Image (cartoon, grey):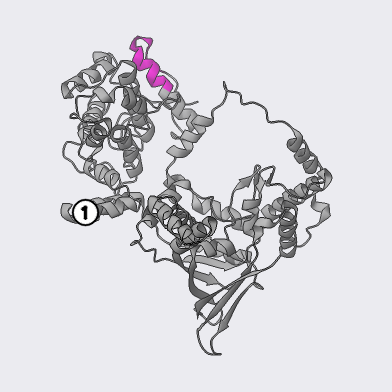
Amino acid sequence: MSNIVKEYDAFVVRQTLESKPLILFAASALEIEQWAGVPERRKLANEETAGFQRQQDPRRITELLKFFGDRNNVVQNPLLGALQDNQRVQFSPTSPDSPFGRLSITYEDHSSLSMMTILKRIVAHLESRVEGLGDDVVDEARVASIMRLESAATSPADEENDDSDSDAYEALEQDDSTIDDAEATASVMLAEETHLVDFYTELRARIRVLEQRGIDDVEEIQGFTKSALIAYLKPVVLVDGQHRLRGAVESAHQSVRGSDGKAKILDAVKGGTPPELAEKQLIESQSRCLPVSLLMDDSPSEHVFQFVVVNQKATPMGKALLGTIVSTSLSRIELAAVADRLRRAGIKLEDSQSVAYLTRAEDSPFRGLVQTGMAGDRPDLLQWTVLRGLVSIFRELRGGRPFNQKIDYARAWKMEYFPQCGLVGPGTDEERFEEWSRPDGPWRDIFVRFFSRVRDHFGDPIEVDTFNGWGSTATSNLFNKVSLTVLAADYFDFLYTQAESLADLEDFERTMNDWLKNGRVSSSYFNRDWKLENVKKDQLAVKRLWSQNWQEYRKVPASGLPKKFKP
C-alpha cells in the first residue's frame, strides 16, 4: 500500500528546556481527518475501548454546523493533537536555529485495509505498550461466546417490555451538566492498563473468530467496527477538538448539497471535469483551514494527561452564566444586530432571554429563585437548566411527557388543538406558532400563571425550608425538577384528553380550576414527609413513581393521598 505525504509550514515552540516541543500549523479539515484519529472512550459490544475521548455528541455537531455555515465565523482555539506514530511525523527546520520549518505527515489510506489487518495492527501496537501480552491472555470461553453471538439470529424485540423509547428520552433529557467528566477521565488514568488488557483480549478473540470462520474482512464483528478501530492506526491522535473537526468536515460536505454547490458542479462538468472529480474539488475548496497544536510526544499517558488538563483544569463557562451574560449584557438594539449570527452559531438566544426574564420579572413565581452562574448563588436555588426545560414545555410545546408514559402531551396538544387556540392571532399554523413561541409570546403569560397557581395552591413561599417550600430545592417536595416537570406534563395531558384549545386567558383559568378539580385536589399534597432519606429524586424509578402517584390522585382525589414516594 502506497503512503500519502502531506507537508505544512510550521512553527516550533518549546515552553521549557525539559518539555517536548509543540508544532503550530494549519491544515484543511479534510486532510486532518485523514491523518488524525479520535480514540473514543466508548463501549463496543459492551466492552470498553482504550480511548479517552468521549463519544461524539450529535447535538454539538449540529450546533457547529450552524456556526461553520457562516463563512465569516472563525474558530480561534486550535485542535490539540499528539503523536501516535513518531516515525511518520517529522519536523524539519529551515535552518539549525530557526523555529520555522516544514512538518511532514505520512499516512495510509486505511479504507482498503481488511478487518483482520486492522485488528492485528492494533494488537501489535498494544503489545509494544504493555508487557506480558500474548496468546496466554486470550480467554477461550470468550472466543466461544463471540462465536455463538455471531451465529445466533437476532431475537425479536419484546414490545411489551421494550423501554428503549423511555431510555432515549432519559438520555435526551439529561443535561450536559450532569456528566461527571472528572470521574470519567480519572477512571482512564487509574485503570488504564487493566482496560488495555481487556481491550487486547477482545481484539485477539475476534481475530481467532475470523480465523476459525476463514474470513479476512467484515465491516463489523460484534460491535467492533472498522471505522472506530482505524483511529488507533493513524499517525496523530486528537486530544481535543473532535467536534470542531467533525463539524468542519460535515460543513464542507454540505457545500455540495445546496443549490449553489450543485450549480458549481454543473458548471465544472460542462467545462469537461468528470462529475465525481468536480464534486470532490468543490468539497476540498470549501474545507476550512483549522489551526493545530501538535505535541511531539507519543506517550499514551501524556495524551491522557493533556486531555485531563484541557477538560478539568480549564474553567468552562456554565450554561447559567452564559445565558445571563447573553441576555443581560446587550441592549435590545445591540442584541438585534448580532441575533441572527448568534442563532446560526447555535446559541439558544430565545431560551436565554426567556429564562432570564423569568428570573427577574416581578410577576414571575421564579423571580430570584434560579441560579445565575455568578458568585453568591445559593446552592439550593433551582438550576438554570431546569427552568429552561420547563420553559421548553410551554414555549416550544415539547417535552410534556409524563415520566411513566411515552406520549409527549405538549406535542400532541400542539398538533391537535393548538390550531384552534385563541391566544394567538390568525395566520398559518407556522405563523401562529411563531407568535406563540416568541420570548414574550402568549406562552409566557400561561407559564407565569400556571406556576403561580401551583405555588399558591401547593407551596409555601414564606417558609421555604418546609416540605412544600417554594424557593429551596434542599427540602421541598414541590420546588424541584421532578415535581415541577410532573405537574407541567400532567397539565398538558389534561388539556389533550379533555380537548381543550384555550380560547383566551379566562378559559385558561377555567382549565386550571378543572385540572385541580375545583379545589378537591388537596393543597397539602406536597406538604408531608415523603420519607426521602438517601433517595435521589432524579432516578428514573423515582420519577416514574411520582408521576404515577400524582396522575392517579389528581384524576380521582377521593382515592386518598398517596403513601409511597420511593421505589
Q: Nearer the viewer, residue 115 or 555?
A: 115
Q: Is residue 555 magenta?
A: yes
Q: Residue at x 37, y 35 (%)?
A: 481
Q: Is residue 525 above or below residue 45?
A: above
Residue at the outermost top position = 558
Residue 331 appears at what percent x and percent y? 17, 54
Q: Badge 1, how many Cα within 10 Å: few under 14, some, many 20+? A: some
Q: Secondary structure at mark 1?
A: helix
Q: Is residue 69 above or below residue 14?
A: above
Q: Nearer the viewer, residue 127 or 528?
A: 127
Asked whether the viewer can see residue 312, the reply is no
Residue 26 appears at what percent x and percent y? 47, 71
Q: Residue at x 57, y 20 (%)?
A: 160
Residue at the outermost bottom position = 96
Q: Nearer the viewer, residue 517 or 52?
A: 52
Dominant secondary structure, magenta: helix
Asked whether the viewer can see residue 105, the reply is yes
Q: Quadrant of residue 95?
A: bottom right
Q: Is residue 425 left or right of residue 41?
A: left
- Extent of the magenta region: 548-562
Residue 236 appears at what percent x and percent y? 59, 66
Q: Is residue 545 magenta?
A: no
Residue 133 appears at what percent x and percent y? 78, 58
Q: Which residue is mark 1?
A: 335
Q: Is residue 430 above or below residue 182?
A: above
Q: Is residue 14 left or right of residue 510?
A: right
Q: Nearer the viewer, residue 542 or 334?
A: 334
Q: Is residue 299 left or right of residue 331?
A: right
